[in-house]
Image (cartoon, rainbow, N blue to C red):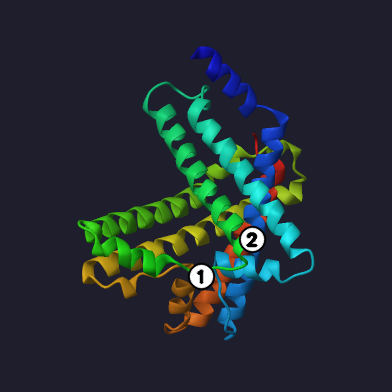
Amino acid sequence: MGETKDAAKKVENSTAVEWLARLGLFSRGVVWLVVGLLAVQVALGKKTEADKNGALKTIADKPFGHLLLVVLVIGFFGYAAWRLLEGAVGHRDEDAGRKRWTKRGTSLFRGAVYLGLAISTLKFLVSGGGNDKTQPLTARVMKAGGGRELVFVIGAGVVIGGLAMVVRAFRQKFEDKLDLGAMPARLRSATTFLGTAGIASRGLVFALIGWFLIDAAVRFNPDKAKGLDASLKTVAHQPFGRVLLFAAALGLLAFSLWSFIEARYRKI
């Protein structure tokens, strides 16, 4: 058992896994960059789909788009592998007990999320398209026994997770994960701003999606559940909604730029 853990630890610390993880962070940046640009178009009144599938469709329609999608798939699988290995054998330098296991659990969760993202992107690449499945999935869950309560709990978890991102953004703890000494001074200042604005914006968007899930569960109405695209468009229809959506879009663009910086300077 000990030899297996040591072998897994060596794989986690290998150069190949490090570069795959960085490619994964870069891939995340590409997707959120396109989502942010699509959200800007929605704010300007254009009919487009501002979510992951919309981003993938936009990428696929560009020259060498399918090749870039292959790179994204590899990156997401690589990032997932790094996080899963980190969850299984990593965080050895952390304090023993709850802190270590909390961080391992978080790594496992992130690894599972990106594994799902890698698989969904691969399916998109193979099938050539897809739609926002949030509402149909919510409807199926709510029809099952205890499904309404489960949707409520998931929604609450998404809200809490989103608000936790906002708190993390303004505490600026994300800088601890970066090799700041290797950065040019000007980039260091920009990194603080982009990380704070980007992570906070992403957290608020997630919290909004979670709120719609809670609303769907409370009203027992799956139509109230919304994915990223529908949530952003709901914001656009509120008073001053286009201004708010434009601000959110800029925040998502900031997050994409932060992802590119993290891909280069993150301590792995």
* The residue positioned farthest toward the front in the image shown: 127
Residue type, mark 2 in image: Leu
Is residue 189 visible in the rendered image? The answer is no
- The quadrant of the rendering that contains the C terminus is top right
Q: Residue at x 66, y 47 (%)?
A: 75
Whether residue 32 is situated above or below residue 171 in the rendered picture: below
Percent x, y for residue 70? Answer: 70, 54
Tags 2 and 1 touching, CB below 8 Å: no
Is residue 197 visible in the rendered image? The answer is yes
Q: Residue at x 51, y 25 (%)?
A: 89
Percent x, y for residue 6? Answer: 57, 17
First in sequence: mark 2 vs mark 1: 2
Residue corresponding to mark 1: 131
Q: Nearer the viewer, residue 250 or 88?
A: 88
Q: Residue at x 51, y 70 (%)?
A: 131
5 left or right, relative to 144: right
Whether residue 73 is situated above or below residue 210 in the rendered picture: above
Residue type, mark 1 in image: Asn
Circle 1 crowding by C-alpha within 10 Å: few under 14, some 14–19, many from 20: few
Percent x, y for residue 191? Answer: 66, 51
Whether residue 229 is situated above or below residue 188 in the rendered picture: below
Q: What element carries label 1?
A: loop
Which disc number belongs to residue 125? 2
Label 2, label 1: how far apart the Cα atoms are: 13 Å
101 left or right, relative to 169: left
225 left or right, relative to 112: left
Q: Is mark 2 on a helix, strand or loop?
A: helix
